[in-house]
Amino acid sequence: MMSIRSMAWWPGFIQLWTRGELYSLFVALLFAALLNIALLATLVWQEWIAVWTVRILWGFLLGAGLWSTVVSLFFGQQRGSLGSAQESDQLLAISQKDYLRGEYLEAEASLHRILSTGREDVEAALLLASVLRRTGRPQQALECLERLERFDCASIWTSEIQNERRKCTPGNNLDS
C-alpha cells in the first residue's frame, strides 16, 4: 500500500487527507485544474494556448510541487520533534486521567489539542472515539474511527479499532 507521504508533491493533498482542511481542498483542486489545463494544452490542443504560456504554466506547476514537497518534509520533521512529542504525551496522560475520572469534556478538549497538531497519534484518536461514544455521540465516534484508519500506523491497532467500532453500533450495550 502506498504511503500518504508519497503524495507530498501535490500541494494541499496531505493537509486535506490528514486534517480535512477546507483551504487545502481549494489548493488541491486549483493545482488539479492547472495540471489538467497544462496537459490539455501540451498533448491535445497545442494551438489552444501560446507555447510560452504553457511553458510558464509547467514551470509554475513544477515549482509548486517542489515547494509542497520541501514544506511537507520540513513540517513533517517539525511535528516529530522531541518537545512536541513530550507535550503530546503529557496531554495524553492528562486526557486518560480525565477519562478515567469520568470528566469527558476535559478529556475531549485535551485530545482535540493533541490531534489538531496534525500528528498521527493513534492512542489519542482511539481515546477520543471512546469519549465521543460515552458522551452519546456514536456517529461522531464512528467518523473519528474512520479518520483514524487512514493513519499510516493504524494497521497495528486494527483489533482495538474494530472493538471500538462494535461498541458504537446501535443495539450494542457494551460500555467497557
Image: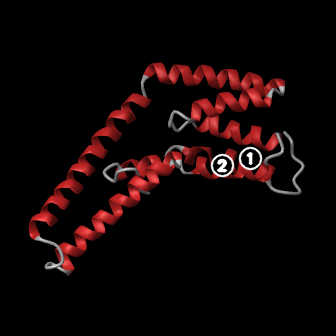
- In the visual, does 73 lie left or right of 58? right
Q: Is residue 78 left or right of residue 63?
A: right
Separation (CA) of disc 1 from disc 2: 8 Å
Instruction: Provide the residue designation for mark 1.
Output: 164
Viewport quadrant of the C terminus: top right
Query: What crowding class fits label 2: few (fewer than 14 Cα within 10 Å), some (14-19), or many (20 or more)?
Result: many
Residue 6 sits above or below residue 111 on the image? below
Q: Nearer the viewer, residue 51 or 64?
A: 51
> Which callout, 1 or 2, points to the residue nearer the camera?
2
Label 1 sits on what residue type? Glu
Locate residue 55: give its quadrant. bottom left
Q: Is residue 131 above or below residue 22?
A: above
In the rendered image, the vertical position of residue 101 relative to residue 28, given as above or below: above
Looking at the picture, how far across and down is residue 36, in whole percent? Answer: 30, 69
On the picture, is 117 further left or further right than 162?
left
Task: Name the secondary structure under disc 2.
Answer: helix
Is residue 3 among what the camera can see? no
The residue drawn where x is 43% and y is 29% is 80
Which residue position holds label 2? 145
Q: Label 1: how many residues lie within 10 Å, few (<14), some (14-19) or many (20+)? A: many
Location of residue 8 in the rendering, given as x and y in whole percent from the top left corner? 34, 48
Give the quadrant of residue 157: top right
Determine whether label 1 and label 2 are within 8 Å by CB.
yes
Give the residue type at disc 2. Leu
114 versus 72 height, above or below: above
Q: Earlier in the sequence, mark 1 or mark 2?
A: 2
The residue under the point 72% across, 28% down is 107
Q: Considering depth in this image, is 17 or 38 the residue closer to the camera? A: 38
Q: Position of residue 121 (x, y in %)?
A: 56, 35
Which residue shows up at 74% across the image and 47% down it?
164
